[in-house]
Image (cartoon, rainbow, N blue to C red):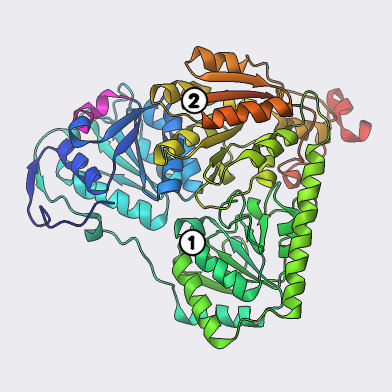
Amino acid sequence: MGERTSSSIRKKLRMTPSEAIVETLLAEGVDHVTGILGSAFMDMLDLFPAAGIRFLPVRHEQSAAHMEDAYTRITGKAGVVIGQNGPGITNMVTSVAAANMAHTPMVVISPSAGTKTIGWDGFQECDQVSVFESITKETVKVTHPERVADCLRTAFRIAYAERGPVLYDIPRDYFYGELEDYILEPHQYRVDQRGYGSSEHIDEAVQLLESAKNPVILSGRGVVDAEAIPVVTDLAEFLTAPVAVSYMHNDAFPADHSLAVGPIGYMGAKSAMYSLKEADVILAVGTRLSVFGTLPSYDIDYFPKDAKIIQIDINPRHIGRTHPVEVGIIGDAKASTMEIFNRLKSKSANTLSKENQEKLNQITERKADWASELEELAMTPGDPMNPRRALYEIANLLTPETVVTSDIGNVSSTSNAYLKFTKSRKHLAALTFGNCGFAYPAALGAKIANPNNPVVAIIGDGAWGMSLHEVSTAVEQKLPVVACVFNNGAWCAEKKNQVDFYNNRFVGADIEGPNFAEVAKSMGAKGVRVDNPEQLRTEFMKALQSDEPTVLDIMVDGSQLAPPFRKDALKMPTRLLEKYAHLDYRNW
C-alpha cells in the first residue's frame, strides 16, 4: 500500500488521464501490471518505465489474472491486469471468474471502444461491462475523462472491501486530454481493517463454545488473509479442539500442530472428516462453507447436520448461505477470533483434563492411521508409476518455504490428501471454479510475489496443454518455477466418470501429447521426463534448487484413478430409443 504523505493531498494537479491513472496506481503501491500489449492503452503504458511500474507480458490473457490471483494471495496486495479492448479482455473471463470465486482482490483495467464509435460494431468492440457483471464484485465505468482517478480509487476500494475482482472500464479515448484532480493516499478513501462484529454475537459464540463437548474449528482462507493463525491456535489449544482446514486451503493451519487434523472436501483427510462428523459445535473462521467443499468424500457424509455452527466471515453475503448457522459474526477473522478467545479465557480456566487428553490421543491416532493409509495407497505399483507415489515423493521433499500451486483434475485434486504445510500463504489451488490451466501461471505470479522461495506447480497433462505456452514467459522473465506435469495420457477425472457410469466407453478422454520435456527445452527451459520414484526424487531436488524454469514430465499410470468429483451429480444412463438401447445400464 502507498505510504501516508502530506504532499499533494489537498492540492489538485494538472495531468493527463493516463498520468492520473498511473499516479493512482503508484499511490496504491502497484509495482507491476500483467497483460498483453494493446493499442488501446499505449498512452498509459508509455509512462510505466518512468513511473517505476513493470509491465509483465504473458502469452495469453487468461494467464495474467491467474498470475495476479496468486500474487495477491501471497502478498495481500490487489493485483492489476490489463489487455486490449474486446478479445484481450474477454480472454480473461475464465481467470477473473476464478479469482472471484477465490475471493481475491484484483483490478481489471478494461479499455473499451472509443466513445465516438460505440455501438457501430467496430474493430474489437465488445460490451465488456455486461460480460463481467456476474463474475466481478463490481463493474466501474469511467463516465468522463476527468473521473479516471476517482473511478480507479472506487475500483480498489470495492476490490478490498468485498474481496474480489473489479472491472475498471475506460473508453480508449479517455486516456487522452487534460484534467485537474487530487492524487489521494489509500487511507483517505478506503479502510483495510475491520472490527470483531457484534458484541452480542461474540457472547453467544462464547457460550456455545464453553458448553460444547466436541468443538471443532474449521480454518479457511480468511484466516490466512487476516494473519489469524496464531490466535486460532491459541483458541484451539484452550478448547483442545481439533482444527480442520477448508477445501484446498491446506496452509490455513500448521499441519505439524498436535490439534491439526487436515483438510476437508474432495480427496481431503479422513482424520479431519471423522473429527468434524463428531462435532457438536463448529467454529468456521474465514470460510464461506462452500457446498462443494463440504460434500461427502470417501463415502463419508462427514459434515454434521445437527452441529451448531458459528460462522465468522468478513462478507455478510456468505453468512448462513450454504449451511444454517446458530451464530453469524460479520467481522475480521483475526479480530473476531481474538475477542472470542479473550472472553472465553476470562470466564473459564484452561485445564488439560482426562477427557481432553483422550481427545489428543484420538487425534494423534487418527492422523497416524490416515498417514499410513496414504502411504499404503502410494506404494501400490503402477505402470509406469502410481500417480499417488509421485505425489507422495514430492510432498516429502517440499521445504517449509516452498509454495505449491495446484490445478484441477484427477491427480491435482488428489494432492489435497498429500500436501502439508507448516506456514501460511504456501498453498494456492484452483479452488471451486475448477478451471484447468490455473497452476502454472499462478506459480509465475507466486514467484514474482516471493522470488526467494521455491515454487512448484502440480498439473495434469490436460491442464498443461492450456498453460504450457507460459513457459516462454517464465524463460523471458527469469522465473525459475518447477512444473510437475503428471502425464497419464487422458482427462482422467472425466475418464473415471466413464469408467463408473458409462461402462468404460471413452469418448474424448484420451490425450495424445508430445514429449513435454522436449517441448520445454525448445522453449529455453530445462525439461526432464521421469518414470520412476528414484529418478523423480533426484530430478525434483535438482529442479527445486535450479535458477532456471524446469518442466518435469512425470509419466504415471492412467488407470489408477481417484473417485469421481461429483457422484451426486451423475446418474446411471437410461436410454429410450431402440438404437441406443445397448447403452442403457440395465442392458450391460
Residue behind mark 1 = 317
Q: Please name whichever residue, 533 or 216, is drawn nearer the observer in this view of the structure.
A: 533
Most distant residue in the bottom direction: 347
Coordinates of residue 73 in the picture (x, y in percent): 45, 47
Residue displayed at 38% across by 67% down? 194
Query: Which amino acid type is shown beneath numbered disc 2?
Result: Pro
Given residues 92 and 261, the one toward you in this image is 261
Q: CA distance from mark 2 to mark 1?
A: 41 Å
Side of 8 relative to 104 (left or right): left
Determine which residue is flagged by label 2. Answer: 549
Q: Nearer the viewer, residue 75 or 102?
A: 75
The kind of secondary structure element at disc 2 is: loop
Is residue 444 at least partly visible in the picture?
Answer: yes
Q: Residue type at mark 1: give it.
A: Arg
Task: Tell whether position 39 is magenta.
Answer: yes
Of the two numbered discs 2 and 1 on the same chain, state the one appearing first in sequence: 1
Which residue sits at x=47%, y=71%? 336
Asked if the magenta segment contains residue 43, the reply would be yes
Q: Is residue 4 left or right of residue 91?
A: left
Magenta highlight range: 37-48
**For the stretch drawn in magenta, what is the main secondary structure?**
helix
